[in-house]
């Protein structure tokens, strides 16, 4: 055990950082200092080649949030509702609940006080699906973005990892002045959390998803 780490606290943070879509305080502003603390922690994440090409676009302007939400809902269409109905038909209540929450978040996204868009300088456009350049690009921003979400959770803020706005990436880039050589990877709505607490989600035992010394029956 690492002597400088509170293991139970670390494990609780890692296992209870959930996607928050409903229990967000839509009326309370989020302090700029809290957001900068979370970004400072995110900057400690590893990057390929020590590139440190991160960028976090923090949107608090009401008009821009409204337009982002509009683009997001255009991208979503009826997909969340359709996915929820499919999950219900196969008896998957947990997934159906997640899609219902996603639909709710889309409806109120314009009211969420902060939208954070993690970005990385560079592009994987034209790369093959299995490509070390693309893997390195995304691998250099996703750890930082998740560190931001963990830091937010520890400070009483709720976040949700969303990507549907990427279907309107060019319009979002134009709205926010994001350069053409910068890649957006997610949109994280951020607000103070209004719930009492989190519990770990139901997941199958690790033995069922672990393959030893090669891919085979887990």
Image: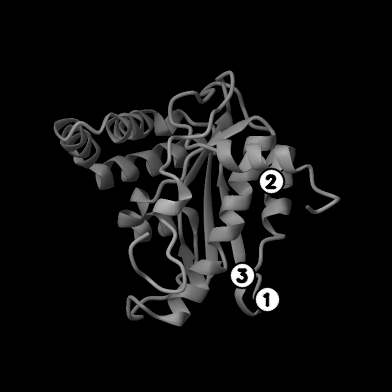
Disc 2 crowd rating (10 Å Cα; few below 14, some 14-19, many 20+) is many
Residue contact between numbered discs 3 and 2, judged by CB atoms under 8 Å: no
Per the image, label 1 sits on a secondary structure element best described as helix
User: Percent x, y for residue 162?
Assistant: 41, 46
User: Percent x, y for residue 25?
Assistant: 54, 22
Residue at (37, 76) in percent of width and height? 125
Residue at (36, 56) in percent of width and height? 166
Q: In the rendered picture of this protein, how many numbered marks are placed on residues?
A: 3
Disc 3 crowd rating (10 Å Cα; few below 14, some 14-19, many 20+) is some
Colour mapping: one colour
Query: In the picture provided, is 105 more to the left or to the right than 190?
Result: left
Q: Extreme left residue here?
A: 89
Q: Mark 3 or mark 2: which comes first in sequence?
A: 2
Residue at (32, 45) in percent of width and height? 71
Residue at (53, 68) in percent of width and height? 139
Q: Quadrant of residue 209?
A: bottom left
Which sits in the foreground, 61 or 18? Answer: 18
Per the image, label 3 sits on a secondary structure element best described as loop
The residue pinned by badge 2 equals 38
Which sits in the foreground, 121 or 12? Answer: 12
Query: In the picture provided, is 55 more to the left or to the right than 105?
Result: right
The residue pinned by badge 3 equals 53
User: Percent x, y for residue 67?
Assistant: 38, 41
Q: Mark 1 or mark 2: which comes first in sequence?
A: 2
User: Percent x, y for residue 75?
Assistant: 27, 47
Report if residue 122 is visible in the image: no
The residue pinned by badge 1 equals 50
Q: CA distance from mark 3 to mark 2?
A: 17 Å
């Amino acid at each position: 055990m690492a002597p400088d780490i509170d293991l139970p606290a670390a494990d609780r943070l890692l296992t209870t950082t959930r996607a928050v879509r409903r229990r967000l305080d839509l009326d309370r502003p989020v302090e700029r200092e809290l957001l900068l603390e979370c970004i400072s922690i995110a900057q400690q994440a590893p990057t390929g080649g020590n590139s440190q090409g991160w960028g976090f676009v923090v949107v608090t302007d009401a008009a821009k949030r409204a337009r982002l939400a509009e683009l997001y809902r255009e991208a979503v269409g009826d997909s969340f509702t359709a996915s929820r109905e499919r999950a219900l038909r196969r008896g998957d209540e947990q997934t159906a609940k997640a899609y219902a929450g996603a639909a709710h978040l889309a409806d109120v996204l314009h009211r969420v006080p902060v939208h954070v868009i993690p970005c990385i300088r560079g592009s994987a456009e034209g790369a093959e699906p299995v490509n070390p350049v693309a893997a390195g690009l995304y691998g250099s921003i996703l750890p930082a973005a998740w560190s931001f979400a963990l830091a937010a959770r520890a400070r009483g803020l709720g976040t949700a990892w969303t990507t549907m706005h990427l279907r309107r990436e060019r319009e979002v880039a134009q709205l926010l002045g994001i350069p053409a050589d910068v890649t957006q990877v997610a949109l994280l709505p951020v607000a103070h959390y209004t719930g009492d607490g989190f519990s770990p989600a139901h997941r199958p035992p690790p033995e069922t998803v672990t393959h030893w010394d090669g891919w085979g029956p887990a």
